Image: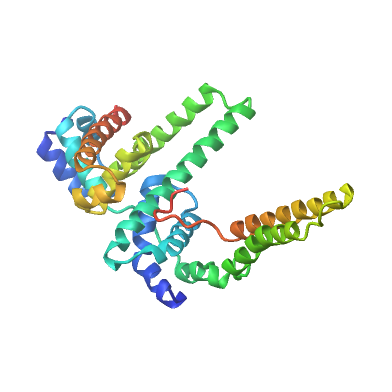
Amino acid sequence: MPPDEFADIVREHEAMVFRVLRRMVGRGDLDDLAQDVFLRLYRALPHFEQRAQLSTYLYRITLNVARDEWRRRRAARRDESLTDPRTTWEKRLSDQAERADEALERRQLWEIVQHCLPDLSEPERAALVLYHQEERSYDEIARIMQMPIGTVRTHLHRGRERLGRLVQERLR
Amino acid sequence: MTMNCEEVRRSIQASGRAEWPSAVSAHLATCDACVQHVLTEALIAPPAVTVPPDFSNRVVVRLPENDPRRRGPRWPVIAAATLSALILPAGLWLLLPEAGTPQHEIWGVWYWAVFLAAAGESAVLIAWAYEPSSQMDGSS
């Protein structure tokens, strides 16, 4: 595919990729991750036969990049806690408390939700983001996440329940 | 001051993304229905992110066509490497001297065959690693 044509695809979908990444991985360098998404898409393009599938594949790639980043950050935190004697459970707990205080201080539900989202499992978070924020149908979410519709519904239901409980805990 | 569900929802709607009164937080902390209601609103609202204006250009610059590190023929290199790995040792085998040839000459031919096969295989592996793998879903 000519680079100019691919640039059009990037411009058409870049806002969606940044939105989903922001929700899935939180703050951080989204630019590099978004570039990674489109480079992976470019390499996969020769396998596409129908343009209509493009958004489904792009969502899937974005979720995969977000999952990889999530694992990388978790591993980095684990390494840090193993090598840095100052990183104790007390410090970690106080970090959590600071995050909660910060959110409470602002009293913005949007901030609190964003703080609580990382505590959900990856499929729960993905299902919530795709359904509510991206307004995808159950059927499309099932295709994106490559799981049965019933499982998508379960992740959505459990995700909402857990998120509700987490938000309430932060507000108490 | 306590608020009922209707007042809380009106208050949140009115405040938008601004701060809301502490009475709202107190109500939400105990009311499952209101929390679910506002969760939906919070999740529907897109997060505040800004796409850099030159983002698409930076992606295009990194495409394999435009990246000299990833440019270059891949299959011809692999084909040549495979041929060298298979045909050259086979050719040497055919050139093996007739019976009665000293043992050290036969071993010499074998050393060359093994060396060429190893070199060819290395070239295949290097060529294979030259371009990153492309999986359909971008998973790693």
| Figure check: B121 above or below B12 | below
Q: Is residue A31 left or right of residue B79?
A: left
Q: Residue furthest front?
A: B99
| Residue B53 quadrant | bottom left
* Residue drawn at the location 76% of the way across and 54% of the way down: B113
Seen from the viewer's position, the closer of residues B32 and B77 is B77
Residue B83 placed where, x, y %? 64, 63
| Figure check: A57 above or below A8 | above
Q: Is residue A94 left or right of residue B30?
A: right
| Figure check: B107 above or below A165 | below
Q: Is residue B126 left or right of residue A36?
A: right
Seen from the viewer's position, the closer of residues A25 and A59 is A59
| Residue B29 quadrant | top left
Residue B1 placed where, x, y %? 18, 30
Q: How is the image coloured?
A: rainbow
Residue A15 placed where, x, y %? 36, 62
Whether residue A97 is visible here, answered yes or no, is: yes
Residue B70 placed where, x, y %? 59, 66
Whether residue A113 is visible here, answered yes or no, is: no
* Residue drawn at the location 63% of the way across and 25% of the way down: A85
| Figure check: B93 above or below A146 | below
* Residue drawn at the location 40% of the way across and 61% of the way down: B50
How many circles with numbers are drawn on the protein?
Answer: 0
* Residue drawn at the location 69% of the way across and 58% of the way down: B90
Seen from the viewer's position, the closer of residues A113 and A144 is A144
Seen from the viewer's position, the closer of residues A74 and B130 is B130
